[in-house]
Image: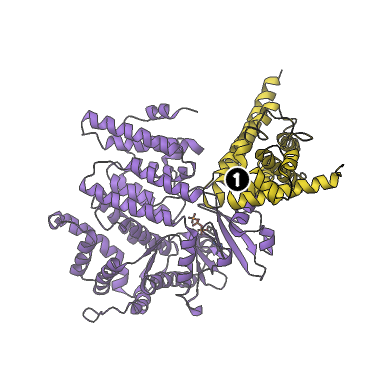
Chain colours: A purple, B yellow
Amino acid sequence: MPSLAQLLESFPETHDADAPADAALSEMIDSTALRPVPLGRMRRFGLLGTLQAKIAAAYLFYWVRGWFTSAAERERLLAETHWKSAARVLDSMSYLRGAAMKVGQTLANFPDVAPRAFVETLDQLHYDAPPMHWSLLAEMVRNELGDDPQQLFARFEQRAFAAASLGQVHRAELRSGEEVVLKIQYPGIARTIREDMRNLLLFLLPSRLSKDWESVKAQADDLRRRLELETDYEAEAATLTAVRSLFREDDGIVVPRVHSQFSTPRILTMDRIKGVHLDEFVARGPTQEQRNEVAKRLIRAWYRMMYSGRLLYLDFHPGNIMVLDDGRVGLLDFGMMLPLNDELWTLFHVIDRALTTGRREDRIAANEMWCDVDRDAWTADRVEITDAYADWCWRARYCGGEFDFGDEADFREGVDLFAKMAARRYTRAKPCTPVICRSQFGWRSILYRLRAKFDIRAIAESEVKATGWDRSDYL
Amino acid sequence: MRVSAETKQATRDRILRSAQRLFADQGYDATTTRDIARTANIAAGTLFNYFPTKDAIVASWARQALDDATEAFDLEASDVSGLEEDLFSFVALGLRKLKLMRKHLPALLETSLSPLVTHDAGDGPSLRVAQLEVVAKLAAKHGHGEISTVALQMYWSLYAGLLTFWSQDESRKQEDTLALLDQSLNMFVGWLRNNGAARSATNQP
Ligand SMILES: Nc1ncnc2c1ncn2[C@@H]1O[C@H](COP(=O)(O)OP(=O)(O)OP(=O)(O)O)[C@@H](O)[C@H]1O
């Protein structure tokens, strides 16, 4: 195997711009919900395993260098050294490999939209825990729950039933007869990840920041904190319980119940949801009616969490959505939620006005509040593009009536607008913006995938009531 | 007066139990042999006949714990995925038995745990040899044939390193030790596999 130094030397001198930036970006956004991340040019290099991480590192380095082309030679060398150290750090983080690869691969594609794309790809970070054999798993159960799995449970499946990013998922049956799943972390991975993430960001972000980069740094830090939260199963259990209480039997939405006597920061035990993942549901060729029903339930769940729970569900992903035989919809994975604090809540109220009236001036007011940019930075072009994007996001809602979420042209329009915004570096915004944008594309891609047609405004209106907002002057 | 073997064993056990209690209550360093003798209701001189030093008490205790583990371990277990897993079960079981004395293990690094010791002060092969016998059996069970002394030496270095790490592991419920064990065994078995393969390759005519 070649050394990292050799790899760093061997990568191409010039960038072959075979993929226009926005086409590549739309591919990336698609991938968050429509299919596994495309390997694209990585696959063309025929690379596997650990080598991928190194190549990704080399690409990142390449990108950093390109970004200094106009700068003095000295500064460029500095950036290169900086990057080489980062590559070395990266090389030692085996479970971040998948993530590093994605970061590298995406950034290599967008030399000109880097800062935003940087955060966007970090946002897709997925950890890759090593597999645990049964002896290790049983030892973790003993360590965490104080007894052998065979003693604690009526039945415990030794083979993992699914992979989780920090470990694996096993099926079991409680002595009381309930069927449950246990999500179990690889020992010590949570803390290692926290430390490594810090190091990674330290290396990746330049030390002298321009104004735009400062905003990027804030966004990246926000992301880091969120990803760290994802490593805490106790926090996830608390969220699950809070969210579960928001739904009633007749909502047709299932959120697994946590069994707290079998849960710790490392093990999360919850009811097993018996159904199929969204992908499989779609593959079975359901009718338009059935697809609409699933979509409506999902959207109701999303609004319920937002308006009654003040929680934004961020991880819209087909793997986190299950459809039960009776048509009910199950939601999984509450590791990543954004609590709407007072500041965001006020902002959401301002957005509600724009969502309700559909007036351009209301949208612009909301955008200005969100983006937090100096007055003189609001050029006509910036106003135009951010407004077009906001209009795309909110159109279905203010228009009301049946909206066709399966319209490909409409979906592409949103992706293109987003790519345009990123390409022009209109990147300053609240730190949580990347995750919110991702969740926006997340649920839109799910509805697109379901080719759903329904009236989203009607659902929203019945849910917004819970906020108690005074909407009298715009309703 | 001749002391019967049973009485002897009973006294030994009593000393060990007293020592364990004192180590747990007041710490290893603060416990003197005199304290132990008093708690065990014997004369200090008698204690000396059984255990010349405090370390010898710990060594004997460790030996007993690991013998218990070896006895409880199912060498024939068939539902394991490979040598890594079998070894993991074996070591993890030992750690569980050693739990109470975790912090005192470094005292043994130069005695019972040393790669140079082949026999314990008392009788029979050393703690190390007893452990390595199981490792060799497991390696044979998983098709690695007769394992070389180099390989056993390497295993022992990893194992002694693990115990040392464990004695100071401050992570939640010492989970870092489990990760270290998992990774050490992967490394060891990987090495065994490659090395075995390399050897048979050079043996080709
Ligand atoms: N309550 C449940 N009932 C049935 N299956 C479940 C349940 N919880 C998790 N699973 C299965 O385990 C998989 C991983 O779970 P989950 O998404 O919660 O883990 P994760 O660590 O957040 O993984 P990732 O970050 O990769 O989505 C799910 O896609 C699903 O197949």
Residue farthest along the top direction in this orientation: B205
Residue B87 position in % (x across, y down): 68, 42
Quadrant of the rendering where the C terminus of chain A is positioned: bottom left
Q: Is residue A144 left or right of residue A317?
A: right
Asked if residue A16 can be seen in this view, the reply is: no
Q: Can residue A238 be seen in this view?
A: yes
Q: In this view, does B144 lie above or below B15?
A: above
What kind of element bears circle 1?
A: loop
Q: Does the residue labelled 1 lie within 8 Å of ligand 1?
A: no
Q: Which residue is drawn at 41% across and 34% down?
A: A88
Q: Where is residue A83 in the image (x, y as percent from the top left)?
A: 34, 35
In this view, the residue in front, A451 or B116, is: B116
Q: Mark 1 points at which residue?
A: B28
B48 left or right of A184?
right
In the picture, measured across the screen, residue A321 lies left or right of residue B194, that is left
Q: Residue B48: which quarter of the image?
A: top right
Q: In which quarter of the image is residue A310?
A: bottom left
Q: What residue type is labelled 1?
A: Tyr
Residue at the spot 55% in from the left edge and 62% down from the top edge = A263
Instruction: Please name the residue shown 77% across and 35% down the image.
Output: B122
Q: Position of residue A384 (x, y in %)?
A: 19, 59
The residue positioned 41% from the left and 51% from the top of the image is A124
Label 1 chain ID: B
